[in-house]
Image (cartoon, rainbow, N blue to C red):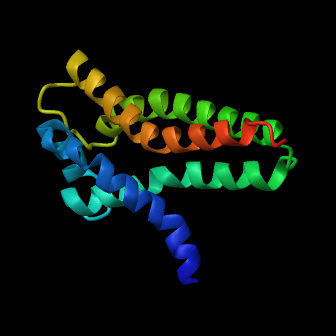
Amino acid sequence: MFDTLILVAGPGISVAVLWSPILLSSRIRSLFDRLPPARSTIASYFVVAIELSIPFIIGTGVVFSTTSTEGAALSNALLNMVFVLTLVYVVVLPVTAVVGLPRISLDWDPTNYGFGTWLLLVGVVLWYAAVFVIPLVFFAFILALPTG
């Protein structure tokens, strides 16, 4: 049970630490301050960071469990998973934060969701994804190297 908890929460906690400078932005702090479950900036921040890591963890597990053991095939499957998840994150998360949250009465941006907010959110999401993407792409590169 503890191993599963570490496997699921460990990457999210690691990313939360590496992603923490985003909390220097008052707009981002405002976003996390208004999010459930605790309506606390730090608690919401860690919950979101861990939850956002789950698709990368599950995707990596699925790639390794369903792909042949051949290095190049495994590498390509890993790269495809990383690309699709990053694209989904960069599109869906900013739209959810700017369009979805205010519609459910979670109005969080004091600057009224302007272009700067969109750029900030895309940058924040790219940073989050990069923390997963860089090691996974490096690992995919290693898997693609010839073994002989």
Q: Residue sitting at 16 percent across and 36 percent down?
A: 27
In this rendering, position of residue 3 left or right of residue 49: right
Residue placed farthest to the front in the image? 148
Q: Residue sitting at 44 percent across and 37 percent down?
A: 130
Is 49 rendered above or below residue 107?
below
- Is residue 120 or residue 94 the one in the foreground? 120
- Count of picture labels: 0
Residue 55: % across, % down: 57, 49
Residue 15: % across, % down: 38, 52
Q: Residue sitting at 53 percent across and 82 percent down?
A: 2
Residue 16: % across, % down: 33, 54
Quadrant housing the C terminus: top right
In this rendering, position of residue 136 left or right of residue 140: left
Q: Residue sitting at 27 percent across and 43 percent down?
A: 105
Residue placed farthest to the top in the image? 115
Is 111 rendered above or below residue 138?
above
Q: Is residue 103 visible?
A: yes
- Is residue 126 or residue 116 the one in the foreground? 126
Quadrant housing the N terminus: bottom right
Q: Can residue 36 be seen in this view?
A: no
In this rendering, position of residue 89 left or right of residue 81: left
- Is residue 116 or residue 73 the one in the foreground? 73
Q: In which quarter of the image is residue 116?
A: top left
- Is residue 88 or residue 130 the one in the foreground? 130
